[in-house]
Amino acid sequence: MGAITPAGGNIKLNQLINTPKEFQGKEFNILVTGVDRSSTGDLSAGAANDSNVNDGMTDMILYVHFNNETGEMKMLQIQRDTMVTTDTSVSGNFRINGVAKTQGSDGNNNMAALCELVADQYKLPIDGFMTIRLEMLTELVDLFGGVEINVPMDVDYAALGLGDSVIHAGYQTLNGASMEFLLRARKIYPDGDIGRLNMQRQFYAALFRKLKSIGNIWDVAKLTPAVLNYMETNLSASDLISFAISMLKIDSSKIMICQMPVISGPQYNGQSLLYPARQADADLLNQYFRENTGPVDASQLNLCDNVIDLSGYTATDPNIQQMGGLMAEADDAQKNDNLDGSNQVTDIMASESTAESESTDTDSTDSESQPAA
């Protein structure tokens, strides 16, 4: 755990933002963030391959809510360009993705500050955080020998001035470098970061399918160095292990992913930002993330949505999807739009599950046939 503890020791979050004690046995909430290693935000070879460069921006922000009683996991994508402040000392760019960088007094990312901001503005309890560098995901993909994914649209490098390669739409196996490009690229989508968030969902589903197909503990052990090298957390070892085990045990039909509704309005101080959609945000959170703690009125959210006239603008759709649905889409693409003959990971999962069940049944039968000791 020492390898993934932030510099200066474990960061202690304000107790007020943790899950209330009376609900701690019922739910567990963490903020998962991804830090882009490019200091320039471009996708040039130099920036993309320099593992020592880190601009500190948390360009992936995912609130993960476990319901221990129902066995459900709900994930909330928070857009990187969401406006959270008018004070540049808080984020530097008015956006949520700059909070952890600007608030770091020792030059390191201060995820506690980001957690406290999310908890305060959205009234969400947070028990801890996990921060990953994009290199971890890239290395994990290569350790797997590639990951099977359904790419919903052509991704043209040439359109971004990065060469002539194209990742074509369809089901295929991608290596770490190609997967990194998919996760980072935004300009290829008409709706910018919203499109990237939707693409990232395909990756979450693909990675979940792959992790679920791991055969034994030794295969899991191979992943440990990649995780430890590129992750920081304030979770205890027991919490981290419980998180991993719980995630892999959850059925895909019980995993939901959605996006925080936002409003794309006029520029603020010359910057194009996404503004919180107060009522839509409150409705989404109350319906899916407050089954234990109870609803919170929209007026109680401390959102930065009153700095500009947003009348006449509409909120984006939360785009609620089940992980099982994403997997079903990938299964259909594997059968009908397979570009390179890639395997169907769910078939592997199903066969392993069947084999394990048959093995358990045999063991049970054998044990029942043995005389009592």
Image (tube, rainbow, N blue to C red):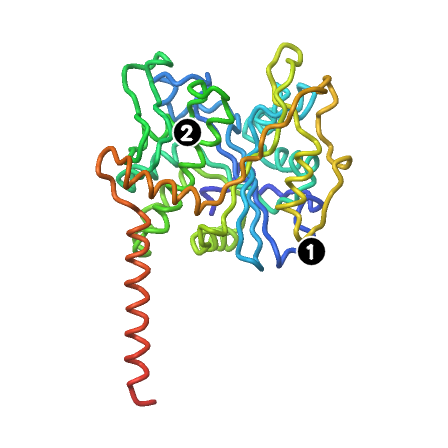
Q: Which residue sits at x=58%, y=23%?
A: 81
Q: Is residue 322 above or below residue 90?
A: below
Q: Which residue sits at x=72%, y=20%?
A: 311
Quadrant of the image for the C terminus? bottom left
Whole-angstrom CA distance, mark 2 to mark 1, is 37 Å
Horizontal side of 289 relative to 294 (left or right) equals left
Q: How many marks?
A: 2
Badge 2 crowding class, 10 Å Cα cut-off, few under 14, some 14 to 19, many 20 or more, is: many
The x and y percentages for residue 24 are 64, 56
For this orientation, the residue located farthest to the right is: 299
The x and y percentages for residue 95 are 61, 23
The answer to the question of whether label 2 and label 1 lie on touching residues, with beta carbons closer than 8 A, is no
Q: Nearer the viewer, residue 117 or 262?
A: 262
Residue 351 seen in the figure:
yes
Residue 105 seen in the figure:
no
Q: Which label is found at residue 338? A: none
Q: Which residue is mark 1?
A: 21
For this orientation, the residue located farthest to the left is: 341
Horizontal side of 109 relative to 19 (left or right) equals left
The x and y percentages for residue 116 are 66, 37
The residue under label 2 is which amino acid type? Leu
Quarter of the image for residue 366 reads: bottom left
The residue under label 1 is which amino acid type? Lys
Could you tell which of marks 2 and 1 lies nearer the N-terminus?
A: 1
Secondary structure under tag 2 reads helix
The x and y percentages for residue 365 are 30, 79
Q: Which mark is in front, 2 or 1?
A: 2
Q: Which residue is mark 2?
A: 183
Badge 1 crowding class, 10 Å Cα cut-off, few under 14, some 14 to 19, many 20 or more, is: few
Secondary structure under tag 1 reads helix
Quarter of the image for residue 282 reads: top right
Q: Which residue sits at x=50%, y=55%?
A: 238
